[in-house]
Image: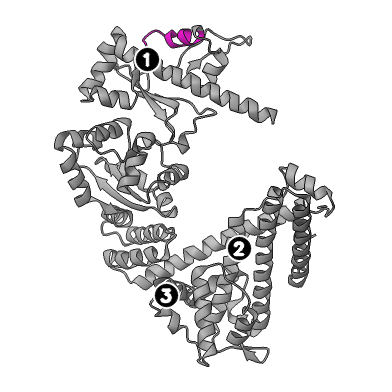
Amino acid sequence: SDEEIERQNERDSLYIALNFAKNYFQTQLFESEEGISIGLSYFKERSLNDKTIRDFELGFSHVAYDAFTKHALKNGFSIEILEKAGLTLRKENENGTFSNPYDRFRERVIFPIHNVSGRVIAFGARILNNDKNQAKYINSPETEVYHKSFVLYGIFQAKNAIRQQDLCYLTEGYMDVISLHQAGIQHVVASSGTSLTVEQIRLIGRFTKNVILLYDGDAAGIKAALRGLDLILEEGLQVRIVVFPDNEDADSYVKKVGSQAFTEFINRHSKDLIAFKTSVLLKDAQNDPFKKANVIVEIVQSITKIPDPIARAVFFKETATQLQISEETLLSESNKILIKLRQQKEKDFQRQQKNNTQNSDNEPFTENIEYQVVENENLEKPDIGERKQAVVYQEEECMRLLLNYTEAEIEDVQLVDFLLEQLSNTAFSSPVYKEMLQIFQKERALGRAVDNGLFIHHQNPEIRLEAIKLTSQRYELSENWKKVYDIDVPHEIERLSEVVNSNLSRLRQRMIQQLMTEVLNKLKAAESMEEQDKLMKMYKHLKDNEKQIATELGNVIR
């Protein structure tokens, strides 16, 4: 569209302006009297050589308040683009007029910030005088091309080394990255003093799943940082932490001992995040039993966020030893957390379903649907991942019923046989539940009774963990069952037929909804009228089935 073209043109203009500024700052550093005497001297004092300075495109901003802006305007850049790029400022007067434009960065050394492809998207700048009225560091504001939560300093220079090493060092500052890079340790990036974000973690995850966080010895800073590090665990990255000796950081320590000794120190002293966090929090708790109990809860919360069930099982085993507490107690606490998370996700899903239903009250199945699907951006667009998650939730309920009621009967047959018959043509999406279902089917086909001990002691740790979780819920969490699942535990067995059939209907409903989402996405991409017509008929058929199941469940879906 014209709007998209205009937006892209503006982005291109911002990139050009930022690159122009980078070249200007470099020229000032190497060729101006002030740049050489102030800026270049500072970098030399920090032991940076010319190659490193040029590799990171470091620069210097002039003392004059509008030197860069005047230079840029003279070279054809508009004041609007300079403002949008975060390079120039103007103050608005009370009468609506603007003051003369002036530079954002003045008398500072400049650290260009690059995106993954190497384009300059922003700048960090450090003051060199002792003026306490000015911030030591200032950064570019967020712009059309710079969103700080998505950026890591040094990622362009480090990405190839991170891939090769299959490891990323994550530091806190610009100079940490630059000094390590100069020492030959190039798989390093920095969060630039901001709290680590999910987007930054995912950026690292594009190149490696292994991260070592490098911290100086500031105890308060470490404890503050620990609160946000569960994000890394949630994204499935393997995290270790190193703390340098007192009064040292990555920059100073590599200069002090050299790259080989630095790397050896990292290898010797790095601890996995869970073990490190446990030791730090236990030290703070000392001998206070209440504080220690809080530590246990916090550590279990962290482990529970690890998506890999095998890794979770290993961490629970090791942490139980470190905390001197039974593994079963940790698993029980984890189960409580998992149930709360599932409860919240189910509520969120139901809320989305309600909103989607309201938005599609008058959804017609005519030739106009082609226009609506292709052109209307407000059309129902549920996320496939959320649909799959809802299906897995119902698969889990099926498995809970199979494991907990192996001897029960409904409708004059054993519950196990009834459920297996109903699920005979159903392909579970969860690999672990699929394997557990196959075990049930195989054992019953051989005429053997199925005991949940077969799963609790299974050689597959994922199956063991799921079996423990699903069988322990009945006993440890029974007082909360009504609240969590809207099921009255003492009487569930008395209405087991209703519970089983309701769950089967919900499983079919969620599977149909997932298929509907996939069909809608295909419909948006369909090119021929014939293909669109075929998909619309398929969608209508699925919608009719969904309505029928909703009626059975007592829901209202129009």
Count of numbered circles in the view? 3
Residue 391 x %, y %: 60, 65
The label on residue 185 is none
Q: Dot 3 corresponds to which residue?
A: 464
At 47% from the left edge and 86% from the top edge, which residue is drawn? 451
Q: Residue at x 54, y 8 (%)?
A: 99
Residue at point 49%, 33% (across, down): 147
Name which residue lies at 44% across and 83% down: 454
As shown in the figure, which amino acid type bears the numbered disc 3?
A: Arg
Q: Of callouts 3 and 1, which one flags the residue occurring earlier in the amino acid sequence?
A: 1
Depth check, front residue: 406 or 276: 406
| Residue tagged 2 | 390
> Residues in magenta?
62-73
Residue 286 appears in the figure: yes
Instruction: Give the CA separation, mark 3 to mark 2.
Output: 22 Å
Q: Quadrant of the C terminus?
A: bottom right
Q: Is residue 320 above or below residue 194?
A: below
Amino acid type for the residue under numbered disc 1 = Ser
Q: Which residue is mark 1?
A: 61
Counting other residues with Cα less than 10 Å from the Cα at mark 1, is it few (<14), some (14-19), or many (20 or more)?
many
**Is 152 colored magenta in this rendering?**
no
Position of residue 247 in the picture relative to residue 514 (left or right): left
Residue 64 painted magenta? yes
